[in-house]
Amino acid sequence: MKSKFEKSRILISRIIVVAILVFFIATGSYWEEDHGMMSYVLFCIGVIFVGIASLGRMWCSVYIAGYKDNKLITKGPYSLSRNPLYFFSMLGVIGIGFATETFTFPLLLTALFAIYYPFVIKSEEARLRTYFGNDFEDYVKKVPAFFPRFSSFDEPSQYMMNPAVYRNHIFSALWFIWIVGIFKVVEGLKELGFFGHLWIIY
């Protein structure tokens, strides 16, 4: 049975996204105002991180689409990390932060991620232990919990997935890109004078 952390994960993520968007609308970037090159570099870093995150989440979804909680997945990205979806999500969160062209947002979002997601991971792994027992314990011994270990990579030559489930996963994998797009729209509206900013952040 899913814990309160797992059940509330999506809702909390959406609340944070809305809060960040409101905060973004109300603030301006110090780097955009006075250091155009730094602003451009920060945005490019954000796009790179978001691109890696989206591709990584789609890669993970190939393996878990239709199998989550029904089969212990240990191949592909799951041979690098026991929680590759969350690892790539972290990269996406950092990317979204940099896409605001500030240092404040990536630090804030990374801190929020680091505070909440360890509880989600711990809860999910406790549930997987009840489902898969010794198989999961063996998996824990071989593969790190979060940060990838590339020496353990193991990829099958063929893999069967559920295309209908995977199609839904693609949309969830691309939300990082959509948020960056929303940020650029808001930035354009700011330049047109639709939004002012209350304060400047670094």
Image: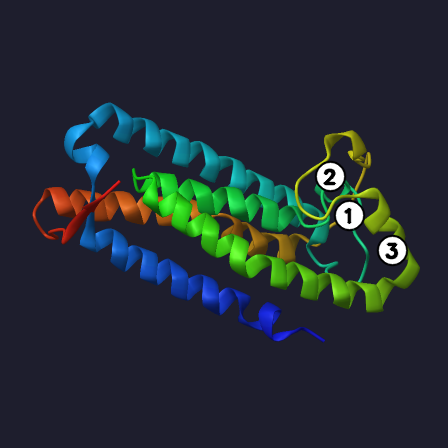
Real-space Cα distance between discs 1 and 3? 25 Å
Kind of element beneath mark 3: helix
Residue at position x 73%, y 31% in the image: 150
Kind of element beneath mark 2: loop
Which residue is disc 3 drawn over? 137
**Residue lying farthest top?**
37
Answer few, some or many: residues within 10 Å of disc 3's Cα (few below 14, many 20 plus, some between 14 and 19).
few
Which residue is disc 1 drawn over? 160
* Residue 197 picture location, percent across and down: 14, 51
Which residue is disc 2 drawn over? 80
Q: First in sequence: mark 1 or mark 3?
A: 3
Amino acid under label 1?
A: Met
**Residue lying farthest right?**
134
**Residue lying farthest left?**
193
* Residue 186 picture location, percent across and down: 22, 49
Count of residue discs = 3
Amino acid under label 2?
A: Leu
Image quarter of residue 87 = top right
Residue at position x 21%, y 53% in the image: 25
Evaluate whether residue 69 shows in this view.
Answer: no
* Residue 152 picture location, percent across and down: 80, 34
Of tags 1 and 3, which is closer to the observer? Answer: 3
Q: First in sequence: mark 2 or mark 1?
A: 2
Evaluate whether residue 133 shows in this view.
Answer: yes
Q: Could you tell me if the residues under marks 2 and 3 are in contact, i.e. CB atoms within 8 Å? A: no
Q: Could you tell me if the residues under marks 1 and 3 are in contact, i.e. CB atoms within 8 Å? A: no
Answer few, some or many: residues within 10 Å of disc 1's Cα (few below 14, many 20 plus, some between 14 and 19).
few
Q: Nearer the viewer, residue 68 or 86?
A: 86
Kind of element beneath mark 1: loop
Q: Nearer the viewer, residue 71 or 25?
A: 25
Q: Disc number at residue 149? A: none
